[in-house]
Image (spheres, rainbow, N blue to C red):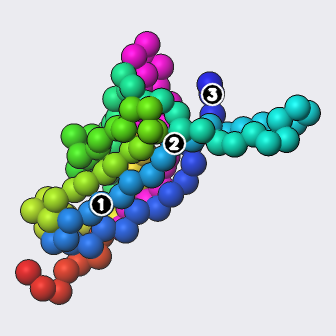
Amino acid sequence: MSFLPGTFNLSIYQNATFNWTFIWTTNPCFGQGTVNAVAQPVDLTGYTATMQFRPYNNDTAPLYYDASSNITLGGIAGTISLTIPASVTGTFTWPSGVYDLLLTDSSGNVYPLLTGTVTVTPAVST
C-alpha cells in the first residue's frame, strides 16, 4: 500500500482538553465487479503512531510537541484517537505550526496518513 497523506487541519483551544477520533478505512475501487464495495476499517493491530507539531515542514525544525504518546489505536476497529490534556494544551504558547501522522506496521512499513496545520487559540480564562 503506497499513498500520499490526506490533509486535515487541527484547531486546539489552549487550556482545554483536545479530543479527536477518526477511523482509517480502506478506499474501495468502484471498478468492474465492485459496484457494492464499501470502505472497511483498516486493522491497526500491531501498528504504532507518530505525531509531532513543528513550526514548519522540516525535521530539524524545533519540536513544539510530540503527541505520539497521546494517540490510542483501536485495533480491528481502525480508530485513531488523539487526546491532549488541558494541562498540556495550557503550555502551548505558539500560534500555529504543522504536523503529520505516521503509522508504522509490525513489519516496519511507515504510512504517512495525515498532514496539516495546527492552530492554537489562546484561552481567555485560566
Among the two numbered marks 2 and 1 on one chain, the one whose residue lies closer to the N terminus: 1
The CA span between labels 2 and 1 is 16 Å
Q: Residues within 10 Å of mark 1 (few under 14, many from 20)?
A: few
One can see residue 62 in this view:
no
Residue 12 part of the magenta-drawn span: no
Q: Secondary structure at mark 1?
A: strand
Among the two numbered marks 3 and 2 on one chain, the one whose residue lies closer to the N terminus: 3
Quadrant into which the N terminus falls: top right
The CA span between labels 3 and 2 is 14 Å
One can see residue 104 in this view:
yes
Up the image or down, 90 lies above or below 108; here it is below
**Disc 1: which residue:** 19
Name of the residue lying farthest toward the front = 36
Q: Residues within 10 Å of mark 2 (few under 14, many from 20)?
A: some
**Disc 2: which residue:** 24
Estimate the x, y position of residue 31 in percent, counting from the top left. Answer: 87, 36
Q: Nearer the viewer, residue 55 or 105?
A: 105
Q: Residues within 10 Å of mark 3 (few under 14, many from 20)?
A: few
Q: Give the magenta range.
A: 102-119
Residue 109 part of the magenta-drawn span: yes
Q: Which one is closest to the eye, mark 3 or mark 2?
A: 2
Would residue 3 appear left or right of 126 to someone viewing this image? right
**Disc 3: which residue:** 2
